[in-house]
Image: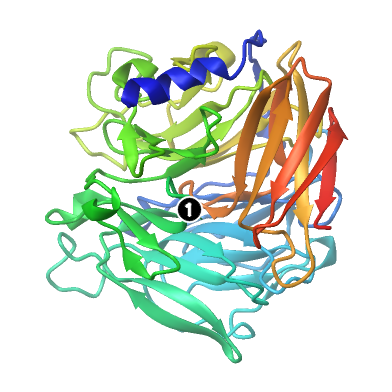
Amino acid sequence: MKRAVFACLALLTGTASAQPLFENRSESLPEHIYNGGWEHFVGGGLAVFDCDGDELPDIFAAGGANPAQLMRNKGDFVFERADIGEIKGVTGAYPIDLDGDGWLDLFVLVAGQNRILKGAPNCAFMDATDAFSLPASNAWSTAFTAWWEGDGARPTLAIGNYVDRADPEGPFEACDTNEILRPSEKGYVSEVLEPGFCPLSMLAAKDSRGRDTLRISNDRHYYVNDGREQMWDIKERRFLDEADGWKRVALWGMGIASRDLNGDGLDEVMLTSMGDQLLQFANPEGGYIAAPYSIGTYAHRPHVGDEGRPSTGWHAEFGDINNDARADLFIAKGNVDQMPSMAMRDPNTLLQQQADGTFIEISQDVGVATFDRSRGAAFADFDLDGRLDLVVSNRRAPLELYRNVTPDAGNWIAISLEQEGGNRNAIGSVIEVSTQGATQSVQHVIGGGHAGGQLLPRHFGLGSATHAQVTVTWPDGSRSQTELAVGARHLVAKP
């Protein structure tokens, strides 16, 4: 089965690839550093979204002990600091339209009381934590995801909490419990989700069974014994086990990335870790299969210099950087702080997918292999030229911004979704783009990454294709199909 799943990758496309190239534009960003003590060794996420309706992606950056910052994109890689007040203790944030008013809000993760910033025109944000009746908490929150159940007006939220700082026996074997926040007439009601094994990423998405599942990636550094990666069935409200095809996996889980890599309509999953970065293929018969080592994604050692100690992976994200219709993979890397067993000079990884489905390391060649302690990251088309740019957050070092200047990149298309009701952005949909006999699919979800994510048009590289057929499976299971022009951003509304 493993060989069969892997072999399918080579059938997707024979499109020639342009050589990717990035230009360092870090000076375009306002000065900002994610910093702090033990509670900010992890975190450092980025939320990337359009907060003013001009289609240009803006950036919200966690600051840890420093204030978080909102950076407005004014075009042509000019970014300006926006006033959001002083918000400290932030580990990460995710954009989400919590009330369906058409303006993206921010769910802000904090080592302390989490916060909701309500969006408004012109990137004006108001603290709406009390207005949404977010339950009081002093937990150390490090993971987030969300989904809508039925035609509910507001989403269900999942919060991952790291080490229980109040446990006198901690920090080892002192992981806090997680929580599900369910909408009610009076706001949100907290439901304990346990056991907790110190999560650093969560993702609500369809699993290999095609069912809505909450995936939780946990840091074994603190759960130490009897912990594991977790899968929780959203409908049945129970954890899956080996009887469900969910094999026990234990790793130093940091981040989650999800993308269908072989065209079978099921997402593969990348789990970052201290040591191997684990890519799992969805098994159509149930569960997941570890990718063979030969695929080139394990990225277990620094690829520059003579450092022999293992790498530490954080945010992971798939994106087609040269628009050849094959998803590539970025992994932010960096030592937690001064862990002697792990690499200290640990450059970020950019893996380019080849026609046979294997991946090769190109970060040094294209100019993004830096040595700071990276944490969060995001692919986004900051200049709207159809090529995915890259922003990276570092611990104790400034943000990095790279403009994608790949010559002769392929064609592309970007898709936004809209429907009536509370779930205005149609979170939970699946977007399929078919060209020249091949189909790519992306789940339109909120969560994953490491302490941050994007809510932007979903980008697809198309190679030499000149037309694209777009099929959307909406959250209610209905489907719509349309043929759209390439080289453009499209809003697809539910019929």
Can you tell which quarter of the image residue 239 is in? bottom left
Q: Residues within 10 Å of mark 1 (few under 14, many from 20)?
A: many
Label 1 secondary element: loop
Report the side of 494 relative to 177 (left or right). right
Report the side of 320 relative to 434 (left or right). left
Q: From the viewer's side, name the closer residue of 234 and 132.
A: 234
Q: Position of residue 50 (x, y in %)?
A: 76, 52
How many numbered marks, from 0 up? 1
Name which residue lies at 35% across and 44% down: 286
Q: Position of residue 300 (x, y in %)?
A: 30, 25
Residue 432 seen in the current view: yes
Q: Position of residue 324 (x, y in %)?
A: 66, 18
Q: From the viewer's side, name the closer residue of 182 and 371.
A: 182
Name which residue lies at 14% across and 53% down: 224
Can you tell which quarter of the image residue 461 is in? top right
Q: Is residue 455 above or below residue 156?
A: above
Q: Is residue 324 above or below residue 179?
A: above
State the residue position of label 1. 451
The image quadrant where one finds the C terminus is bottom right
Q: Residue furthest bottom?
A: 186
Residue 37 seen in the current view: no
Name which residue lies at 15% across and 62% down: 173
Name which residue lies at 55% across and 38% down: 265
Residue type beneath disc 1: Ala
Report the side of 465 relative to 294 (left or right). right
Q: Is residue 344 above or below residue 211?
A: above
Q: Position of residue 379 (x, y in %)?
A: 62, 36
